């Protein structure tokens, strides 16, 4: 009887994976308990809340990419469980379609936004800028931050030797890993470095969660508010913000996963029905996260785009 039960379970899992694969998706499963009765935050993207609530977006074209700007006031921020501030979003399907010729438009759009923030914060060439790559190198959809760090041009050692070239920014970088690897909150590790080095700006790069499949690997969000590692998958850690680090923080993120409940609810909305499968909603301790099957190549390409944008903004002003 037990063998029959496990065979049924195996067939159900195989059927689910086959369904997702046929829709050009792969799946990985994260198990986690949601603390204190908190619901999982379905999206890290302000643009998705804006689309549902008709918040005004300023949009401009940047080559083959589209850039939008949203400014949330305190009332809107409270409603969407975000922080008040400025949110830029760059839209492009270049990475998804692996069209390398269009990558330049994407990283140039990113570089321009970063340069605007550098100007806003009056960052000088010899001011230290600390770049943090959040995420787990061993989990592909969560490895964006560490892989961006691998591709950055770091120069603090040159500045200390007095050999920093005229067009170079004083840059240091770190991939602090995740709490399951270190036993320490990532923000606490970075705060110790901030206290020692005293950078004028911290730039944080991380993978995000989206509500819609259409956003996956096609959206880059840049904000001057905060970022909370793991918030999109119900694994909330301490946030990176000016409040926790004591210096301005610029956050760059790309959605690489969608939780399956959000995916099903999106389908239900399209088919105009409120019935959601109880299999998806019954047990909130089990979270199914969906990511494209081309995620390996997507992460490599996104890492190049973001690191190129950072290098261009910081070292070629």
Image (cartoon, rainbow, N blue to C red):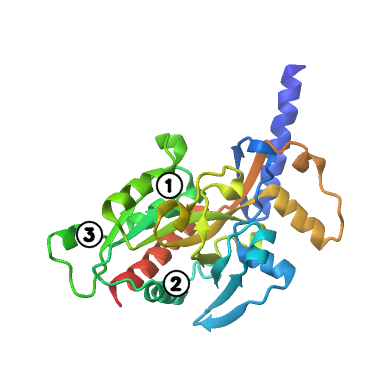
Foreground mark, 3 or 1? 1
Residue shown at the point (18%, 71%) measured from the top left: 165
- Residue for badge 2: 110
Judge the density around disc 3: few (<14), some (14-19), many (≥20) Cα neighbours within 10 Å: many
Foreground mark, 3 or 2? 3
- Residue for badge 1: 187
Q: Position of residue 267 (x, y in %)?
A: 77, 57
60 up-or-down from 150: above or below: below
Foreground mark, 1 or 2? 1
The residue lying furthest to the top in this view is 1
- Which element carries disc 3, helix, strand or loop? helix
Q: Are marks 1 and 2 in contact (CB under 8 Å)?
A: no
Q: Nearer the viewer, residue 262 or 94?
A: 262
Label for residue 73?
A: none
Residue shown at the point (40%, 60%) measured from the top left: 203
Q: Position of residue 102 (x, y in %)?
A: 47, 75
């Amino acid at each position: 009887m037990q063998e029959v039960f496990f065979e049924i379970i195996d067939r159900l899992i195989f059927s689910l994976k086959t369904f997702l694969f046929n829709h050009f998706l792969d799946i990985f499963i994260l198990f986690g308990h949601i603390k204190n009765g908190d619901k999982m935050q379905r999206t890290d993207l302000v643009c998705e809340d804006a689309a549902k609530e008709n918040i005004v977006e300023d949009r401009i074209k940047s080559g083959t990419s589209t850039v939008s700007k949203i400014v949330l006031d305190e009332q809107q921020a409270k409603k969407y469980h975000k922080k008040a501030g400025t949110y830029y979003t760059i839209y492009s399907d270049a990475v998804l379609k692996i069209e390398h010729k269009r990558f330049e438009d994407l990283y140039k759009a990113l570089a321009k936004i970063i340069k605007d923030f550098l100007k806003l914060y009056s960052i000088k060439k010899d001011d230290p800028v600390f770049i943090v790559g959040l995420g787990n190198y061993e989990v592909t959809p969560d490895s964006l931050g560490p892989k961006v760090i691998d591709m950055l041009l770091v120069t603090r050692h040159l500045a200390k030797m007095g050999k920093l070239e005229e067009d170079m920014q004083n840059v240091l970088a770190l991939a602090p890993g995740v709490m399951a690897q270190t036993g320490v909150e990532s923000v606490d590790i970075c705060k110790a470095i901030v206290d020692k080095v005293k950078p004028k700006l911290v730039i944080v790069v991380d993978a995000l969660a989206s509500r819609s499949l259409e956003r996956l690997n096609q959206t880059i969000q840049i904000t001057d508010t905060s970022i909370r590692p793991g918030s999109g998958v119900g694994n909330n850690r301490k946030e990176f913000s000016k409040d926790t680090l004591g210096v301005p923080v610029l956050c760059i993120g790309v959605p690489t996963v969608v939780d399956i409940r959000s995916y099903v609810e999106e389908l239900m909305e399209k088919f105009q029905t409120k019935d959601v499968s109880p299999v998806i909603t019954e047990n909130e301790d089990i979270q199914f996260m969906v990511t494209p099957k081309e995620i390996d190549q997507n992460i490599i390409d996104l890492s190049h785009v973001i690191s190129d944008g950072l290098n261009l903004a910081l070292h070629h002003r």
